[in-house]
Image (cartoon, grey):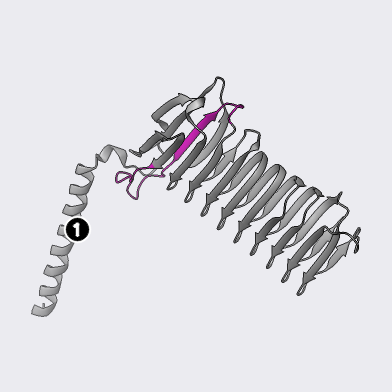
């Protein structure tokens, strides 16, 4: 065998041995038992509880954990963090602000289907602000937050809300679903659909989607609403407002049933290549 080929084989074999040794050392240091090719069951990793009177702002900064907001059975605000890895959170409760941050997790590796979830139990009497952020997790809010300021962001997760008042939502590639908005909204998504069952608009609002559809079940507005979709359809099933509907579309069809040109209230809908329908 050619000497050059032999040398190359020896070098490649040496590199392979080094790589395998480094991998074994990594597994040993990070507890090999946490690595598998399936889905490990999530377990309660951490919990925290505080009095309602000590909090007027709840915020999260998570990486890939889902977030759920649920009704508390008492007058306490409590947190439960579940994970199937060694993930952990840091909770800070100072100056009436409850902050939850996800710590860096070095144990999940590439073999485990990582699952993480933060559940926040909040009493109905809570009137403070929510500022919820997770990079690639879903956000689900079951509580009636019509009296709260709600700010929600997720890079690639879906967002599902029940009743809200003043809401600001941003997601890059997730769908947004809201049961009811009862004041105003700033909503944007790059490639997800937006669905609002009922929108009682009382202050100027903006809804934007780059490549997703926008659907509003019932719209009742006493102030202006701007809706923009680059390549998605815009549909309003029931428009109960006495407003002027102004539309612009590049290559889509437009169907408007009721529009009052004399109205000071304007529903402005713009699409590049989507249909517009207002019933």
Q: Main secondary structure of the magenta part?
A: loop
The front one of 245 and 3 is 245
Residue with the most extreme left position: 3
186 relative position to 94: left or right: right
The answer to if 108 sits in the magenta stretch is yes
Can residue 41 be seen from the camera position used here? no
Q: Position of residue 122 (x, y in %)?
A: 55, 29
55 relative position to 13: left or right: right
The front one of 199 and 83 is 199
Residue at image x 66%, y 40%?
164
The answer to if 51 sits in the magenta stretch is no
What range of the chain is rendered magenta? Answer: 102-126
Q: Position of residue 192 (x, y in %)?
A: 62, 57
Q: Position of residue 266 (x, y in %)?
A: 81, 60
Residue at image x 50%, y 42%?
66
Residue with the most extreme top position: 74
The front one of 113 and 149 is 149
Above-or-below relation of 86 to 78: below
Q: Quadrant of the N terminus?
A: bottom left
Residue designated by label 1: 19
Above-or-below relation of 250 to 89: below
The local secondary structure at tag 1 comes to helix
42 relative position to 157: left or right: left
Can residue 248 be seen from the camera position used here? yes
239 relative position to 122: left or right: right
Q: Quadrant of the C terminus?
A: bottom right
User: Total label count?
Assistant: 1
| The quarter of the displayed image where residue 16 is located | bottom left
Above-or-below relation of 61 to 171: above
Residue at image x 11%, y 68%?
10
Q: Position of residue 168 (x, y in %)?
A: 61, 50
**Number of other residues with Cα within 10 Å of mark 1, as a class: few under 14, some 14 to 19, many 20 or more:** few
């Amino acid at each position: 065998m050619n000497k050059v080929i032999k040398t190359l084989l020896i070098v490649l074999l040496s590199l392979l041995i080094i790589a395998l040794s480094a991998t074994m050392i990594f597994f040993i240091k990070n507890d090999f038992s946490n690595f598998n090719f399936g889905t490990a069951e999530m377990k309660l990793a951490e919990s925290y509880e505080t009095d309602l009177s000590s909090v007027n702002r709840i915020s999260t900064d998570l990486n890939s954990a889902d977030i759920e907001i649920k009704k508390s059975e008492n007058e306490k605000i409590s947190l439960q963090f579940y994970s199937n890895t060694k993930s952990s959170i840091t909770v800070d409760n100072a100056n009436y602000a409850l902050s939850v941050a996800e710590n860096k997790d070095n144990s999940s590796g590439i073999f485990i289907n990582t699952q993480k979830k933060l559940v926040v139990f909040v009493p109905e009497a809570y009137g403070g602000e929510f500022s919820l952020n997770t990079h690639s997790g879903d956000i689900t809010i079951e509580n009636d937050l019509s009296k709260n300021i709600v700010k929600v962001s997720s890079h690639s997760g879906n967002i599902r809300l029940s009743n809200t008042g003043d809401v600001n939502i941003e997601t890059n590639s997730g769908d947004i679903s809201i049961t009811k908005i009862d004041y105003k909204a700033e909503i944007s998504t790059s490639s997800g659909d937006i669905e609002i069952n009922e929108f009682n608009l009382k202050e100027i609002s903006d809804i934007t989607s780059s490549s997703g559809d926008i659907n509003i079940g019932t719209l009742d507005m006493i102030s202006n609403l701007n809706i923009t979709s680059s390549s998605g359809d815009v549909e309003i099933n029931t428009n109960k407002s006495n407003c002027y509907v102004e539309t612009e579309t590049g290559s889509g069809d437009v169907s408007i049933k009721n529009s009052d040109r004399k109205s000071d209230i304007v529903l402005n809908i713009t699409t590049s290549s989507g249909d517009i329908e207002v019933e």
